[in-house]
Image (cartoon, rainbow, N blue to C red):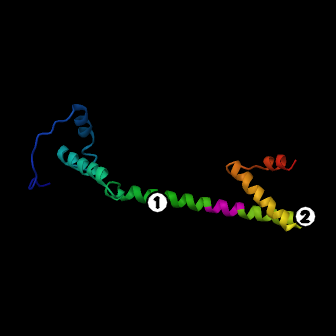
Amino acid sequence: MSYENKQKFALWIHPEVLNKVDKVYREADCRSKSEFIEKAVDFYYGFVTADNYKTYLPNVVISTLKSIVAESDTRQNRMIFKLAVEIAILENLIALQEDIDPLAMERLRGECVQEVKRLNGSFKFEDALEWQK
């Protein structure tokens, strides 16, 4: 590392903070404590002034977060698809057994929407049994 174009100045720092620098500056691939502190200041400056998170989050963190979200989306989409298939099977089995009036069906759909909203989406079969009594 070249000391050209660098300025020397007094730095007042608490001993416990300097101890932290002593412990990790080599692990951070820095040749000196000054280099570590300079990188830390650059990082913190990016954090404080960033309009864009990419200036202070390493690309590895960003790509890892993106892949976690994508994997979660894929898993949720598969489960939603499987549930939709099961519901379609149940609906077709019920439709085979019953002669349901289209107007009554539309009314039931509206009531079900309201009931599921009221229960915040946590509608169970037991709720349907109780509701039908």
Which residue is disc 1 drawn over?
Answer: 66
Please name the amino acid that badge 1 sits on. Lys
Q: Position of residue 31 (x, y in %)?
A: 19, 48
Tag in front: 2 or 1? 2
The reply to whether the C-beta atoms of the residues labelled 2 and 1 are less than 8 Å apart is: no
Q: Is residue 81 magenta?
A: yes
In the image, which disc is placed on residue 74? none
Task: Tell me where the magenta segment starts and ends, as one range.
Answer: 77-83
| Furthest residue toward top | 15
- In-front residue for pair 70/23: 70
In the image, which disc is placed on residue 98? 2
Residue beneath the point at 75% across and 61% down:
86
Tell me, yes or no, if residue 42 can be seen here. yes
Residue beneath the point at 71% across and 63% down:
84
Q: Position of residue 3 (x, y in %)?
A: 10, 53
Please name the amino acid that badge 2 sits on. Glu
Please report whichever mark, 2 or 1, sits nearer to the chain's N-terminal start: 1
* Left or right of residue 6, residue 103 in this image: right
